[in-house]
Image: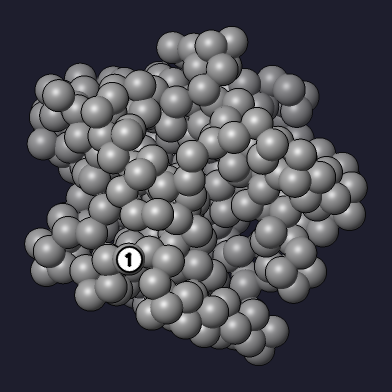
Amino acid sequence: MDGGRAAAEAGKPRERLEWIDAAKGIGIVAVVVGHVWTRGAVRDAVYAFHMPLFFLISGYLFRPQPSLNFARKQIETQGQSYVLWLALAVGFDVWFERLRGVRPVFHDWPGDLWRVAFGGSDLRGPFTVFWFVPCLIIARIVCNVVGMRFPKRLGWPWLVIAGLSLILAYALGRATDVSPLGLLTVPMALVLLWVGWVWADVTWRPVLWVPLAALAAAALVSGSAINMKAGDYGWPLFSMTGAVAISFLIFRVARFPIVNIAPLRRLGAASLTVMYMHVPIVHYLSGHLPKPALLALAVLLPFAVHYLLKANRVTARLLLGVANSRASERQPWSLIATSATRRP
């Protein structure tokens, strides 16, 4: 099975990147919707799939690389941007909340430096999304180490490792919600990366619509939401299977010409910036704007900021993880590292 679908797509990487950006555009809108509507059917529907989708996309793009070099690149790009975005968010919160006479989230300095460094479950309010990137970094490094050692994605070593990781994910999720740097979620993230990697080698057939749609519908109707940050994966196996099914349907729908349009692709390419900026916008303006207006602002303002940052070599390197603006055209930085995807 290795090499079939992936090799076929390697000959047309530009098309592949375009639909992936469209899928990320769908995903990041879902993420924002889930933070604007915090309860009810809309929230439950979004929480049925939105974070698993991004891990699956990253897995789909995964190609094993020399481990030390891969880890270094992850830390120098995603890790650096994480630290800088978090510092900016904390600094803004301290300034803005004091300006309006409200106690900031982090107000006990220097004692709160430990909470900021701990990350993950200690980052709430306007910082609640910051668990994701360090979790993704660590999971991708682990996945790459295993992938270099066992390159056959459906070989028995991977089946055993994925199975044990799945068991560990559920066990840890039941035991605690404490998660330094998002580490609690790494076992499930590793499983999703592997599933996405396996799916990259699957040749699509129309018959796949039926089981995927059935599983997706069952997950949505059940209302079983997933909160990966807290290690809450819904109903064991059922909810994550539904999330995978919904995500793979999005993979397919994102290829449709009516969906794979430039504005959505550009939004997908800006998904890292939208991810970091939208929660503070929602946090500070919730209750002051109607929810549809808040949704539009939380998507469009970070979208505009992303392309302003991208236009400058320094900000593109520091906050978007690209060496320069030309590099960002070759590898549009987003929540998902695209270093394994090649453009001519």
Q: Quadrant of residue 133?
A: bottom left
Query: Is 94 on the left or on the right of 48, as rendered?
Result: left
Q: In which quarter of the image is residue 262?
A: top left
Residue lying at 69% horizontally and 59% vertically, measured from the top left: 241
Query: Is 9 on the left or on the right of 47, as rendered?
Result: left
Residue lying at 67% horizontally and 27% vertically, measured from the top left: 294
Q: Which of 295 and 156 is in front in this view?
A: 156
Instruction: Check the image and report above or below for 320 versus 128.
Output: above
Instruction: Check the image and report above or below for 36 versus 165.
Output: above
Image location of residue 103, percent across then percent down:
57, 58
Q: Which of 319 and 272 is in front in this view?
A: 272
Residue 20 showing in the rendered view: yes
Image location of residue 150, percent across then percent down:
28, 73
Residue under label 1, please give it: 152
Where's the C terminus, which quadrant? top left
Query: Which amino acid is tagged 1?
Result: Lys
Residue 43 showing in the rendered view: no
Where's the N terminus, which quadrant? bottom left
